[in-house]
Image: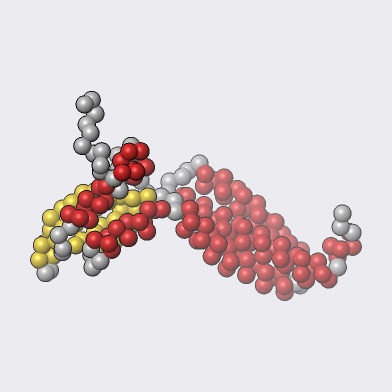
Amino acid sequence: MFDPLFFQSDIFRWLVLPILIFLARVVDVSIGTMRIVYISRGKKYLAPVLGFFEILVWLLAIGQIFQNLSNIACYLAYAAGFASGNFVGMYIEHKLAIGMQVVRIITRREAWGLIDNLKDEGYGITVVNGQGTTGEVKVIFTIIKRKDFEKIVSIVRKHNPKAFFSVEDIRMANEGIYPDQLPASQRLFGGLFSFVRKGK
């Protein structure tokens, strides 16, 4: 156990306490970032739980600030923790890749190779013929899980390196087709077994 006098020492006040405040701010701001993401994604049950823990940790941190108003190290730790928490929260959100996105691909080249590749990978697509400034184009729409974004980009660049594409986050999609919804045989072997019909 710590000696009670330790909590009154300069080491605790100027080193340990600022570090604890810094870590508390990193935690509560990171949780806050995730809470905002879940709210935007319509996760109405998880967001309040995160909000509870966010404000609880924040109260612990701000309470120590008010108890040590003359300690400049606590102020600096509080501010540094807020800045770092934003970075950590965005990093976690990027790694979790929560939600879905709609990808629009516009290409002037013949796009059947790209279209077939997307189908073989299990993505649901909609293809529309269009007219661009320089001629006819194909517009390909697909809704993907955010974690699949890099894979989609690599497929597009493989077939149509100069294709234009845009990406937007969406809150909800109904009746979508995603790679993990395909039968295992199709996920493993592409479209090799796509000719097999149910009931045959």
> Image point 77% across, 66% down: which residue?
16
Question: Which of these two is toward me, 5 or 60?
Answer: 5
The quadrant of the picture occupied by the C terminus is top left
Give the colour scheme of this rendering: secondary structure
Q: Where on the picture, by quarter, is residue 138?
A: bottom left
> Image point 37% across, 59% down: which residue?
150
Q: Position of residue 7 (x, y in %)?
A: 84, 62
Q: How many marks?
A: 0
Q: Is residue 19 left or right of residue 116?
A: right
> Image point 62% across, 53% down: which residue?
55
Q: Position of residue 95 (x, y in %)?
A: 48, 56
Work out whether residue 170 can be spotted: no
Question: Which of these two is toward me, 14 or 127?
Answer: 127
Q: Is residue 45 above or below residue 97?
A: above
Work out whether residue 52 can be spotted: yes
Q: Position of residue 155 (x, y in %)?
A: 29, 58
The quadrant of the picture occupied by the N terminus is bottom right
Q: Position of residue 49 (x, y in %)?
A: 57, 45
Q: Is residue 98 above or below residue 86?
A: above
> Image point 10% across, 66% down: which residue?
135
Q: Is residue 155 above or below residue 143?
A: below
Q: Is residue 151 left or right of residue 164?
A: right
Q: Is residue 131 above or below residue 42?
A: below
Check the image and name the residue furthest to the top: 199
